[in-house]
Image: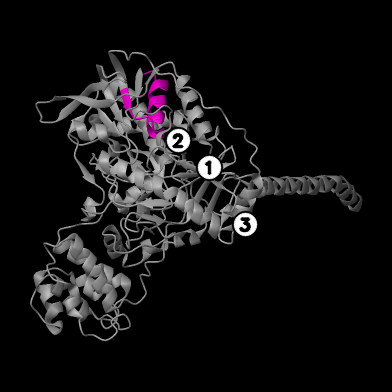
Amino acid sequence: MRIKNLWTRKRLKPVVISMVFIIIIALAAGWWYYKKTRYDFTNPYPRQQLLEVQSVAEPAPSYDVIVAGTDPEGIAAALSAARNGLSVLLVDGKDRQILGGLMTVGGLNTIDFNYAPEKRSLFSYFKDTEILNKGIFLEWYKQIEGTSFDVNTAANTFYNMVKNEKNIDLLMQTKRMEPLTEEQSSGTRTATGMRIVMADGTERLVSAQAIIDATQDGDIAAAAGAPYTFGREDIGDRESLMVATLVFRLDGVTQEVWGQMGRHEDARIDRMSIWGYHDAREYQPTDPAKVRMRSLNIGRQNDNSVLINSMQLFDVDPLDPESVRRGLEIGEREAPLIVEFLKKRFPAFANVTYGGTAAELYIRESRHIQGEYRLTLADVMENRDHADAIAYGSYAIDIQSTSKGQIGTILMNPQQYGIPFRCLVPLEVDGLLVVGRAASFDTLPHGSARVIPVGMATGEAAGAAVKLALSNHQTLRELSHSEERMKQLRQRLKGQGMDLAMKSFEQPAYLANKSYPGLLAAASMYLTSGSYSNDQWDLDGSSNPQRFVNIMRRIRSANPERFENDPMDAIRGQKEPREQPLSLNQAAYIILTAANKNTTEALALAELLKLGWLDKATIEGIEDEEQLTNGEVFMLIRDVAEHYMNIRFQ
């Protein structure tokens, strides 16, 4: 037995040594890859010459599908439809000469990624973070430089992908495009094609069995009669417009300068992107009511230049061409002044030169088409999946500023949520799908779902859906309500390379909090935010009278017909209301004061219960009636919204 053990040990020894050697080599290779990808900031990519885009001289009389808009979402839709055997007209209505829209003409060359949730481990640091959805977005992404890209590379890649599909006719530089519709006996309308005004002013009527609206603002759907909300209308804010941005360019950013920029104290850097420089907000604009600077998002190009997405332009109405023109003019005047400030304020910028601005504004929000399903904040906060999910989102809900003094916020940070196909199907118009940021999203979840990788996934789904509908002689609306067809659509998309799997992850702690129904209501009314960490709403922290008055003022602003009085009247004269506890009686009094109900603080709670505005279960759930928490306050708001304002959040 002893001899056998010795023999076994002798045989195992070289095996163990080999295994240790392999592990050491693997770790060394992993460390090299980690250092190379995380800490090598050299740009090895050559500058591509911009390809001349060839447009068809004359569109055919009819196509299976017309895709309106040459932003990335429209390109993905056209590619998907063509690869499914459909004849496609991809038409641009903005007098552009290259493909890519916002990413290229608008200069938005840094990608807002849609990453999959993952559990961190040692091996996480040696691999790239997984991207959700994949599909055509990933196909395109693998051909560009990285987290930011050279706009020539992006435009050429888009064009080559389109040019290689024989089923796509590309029609650029049209002056106008409008939908053709027919009214049905049911009262709805059906899109039947498009009226296109060519570059020479002549008109073409082109028929199609379906239209995919990939315009940034849902122009085709709106013109066809699809209902929509505008901006923040769905949360009662009918006046505010989210800031627009004009991207500007800096030249002279050599490899040495790039490295210096990345060493700024609050900057983060990779090979193609730098973000940070919070002190850029110190810039004093010529007109603070129209312009403001935020922290810098810097996207690198391959010709020693960078594009900066940081200038905020206020009061630009994206549906008013004159307002957009004025916004461009204001940005073009301000950009050189911003560059001079950056050169003086930050040593790394000292030797750069101003290189001009993008040709189009970056517009974040305009129309929200009303569809067969409306993506809600609950969908995102609860990381919901849907049986007809054709794309997944995970980007933080990024709500940008709307006016001077009203700054933006990160509302919350989801893990992964599904976007139903029904969000692409507008009400009241058949034969039409809407993709991208104008799809059927409420304004707050739109802050996450508006990013281009999600939009490209919806575009890819739309292209495949048209094929499925035509093959089965169904309308797109009928398709959207068929469980069998939705399974087939998801399977088809998976066959095209999309990843439609819901990942494994831990649900956020706020969902287990007893005040979550109140949090959902408050967040849906844009009264609180959780930031990237999802904990800044401080559900178990103490509230105070001034904070509650501020909340009620925001509710009053959105619902003046229900809250006629200033809630501040309820605490006027109270000493240091920010430092005092908020009692249940005082909270009830503040609510009734705002609602113009004559009562006293001592009687207010009984009056609210008599009116039926509060649930007894909410009162019974309060731990200390002399000191309400933020979560308990949100529960009161939930009850008032449901029973008095007739608003349910679910």
* Within-10-Å neighbours for mark 3: few <14, some 14–19, many 20+: some
Q: What scheme was used to colour the molecule?
A: one colour
Q: Are marks 3 and 1 in contact (CB under 8 Å)?
A: no
**N-terminal-most mark, 2 or 3:** 2
**N-terminal-most mark, 3 or 1:** 1
Task: Give the Cα distance between marks 3 and 1.
Answer: 18 Å
Identify residue type, mark 1: Ser
Residue at image point 29% right, 20% down: 198
Most distant residue in the right direction: 3
Identify residue type, mark 2: Thr
Question: Picture quarter containing residue 587?
Answer: bottom left
Relative to 17, say whether 212 is above or below: above
Identify residue type, mark 3: Arg
Residue 315 position within the rendered picture, expressed as x and y whole percent measured from the top left:
28, 51
Circle number at residue 104: 2
Q: Are marks 2 and 1 in contact (CB under 8 Å)?
A: no
* Secondary element type, mark 3: loop
Give the labeled residue for mark 3: 263
Residue 301 position within the rendered picture, expressed as x and y whole percent measured from the top left:
56, 39
Circle number at residue 148: 1
Residue 515 position within the rendered picture, expressed as x and y whole percent measured from the top left:
31, 67
Is residue 78 a member of the stretch shown in magenta?
A: yes
Which of the two marks, 2 or 1, is nearer to us in this view? 2
**N-terminal-most mark, 2 or 1:** 2
Which residues are the magenta region?
A: 66-86
Circle number at residue 527: none
Q: Are marks 2 and 3 in contact (CB under 8 Å)?
A: no
Most distant residue in the bottom direction: 575
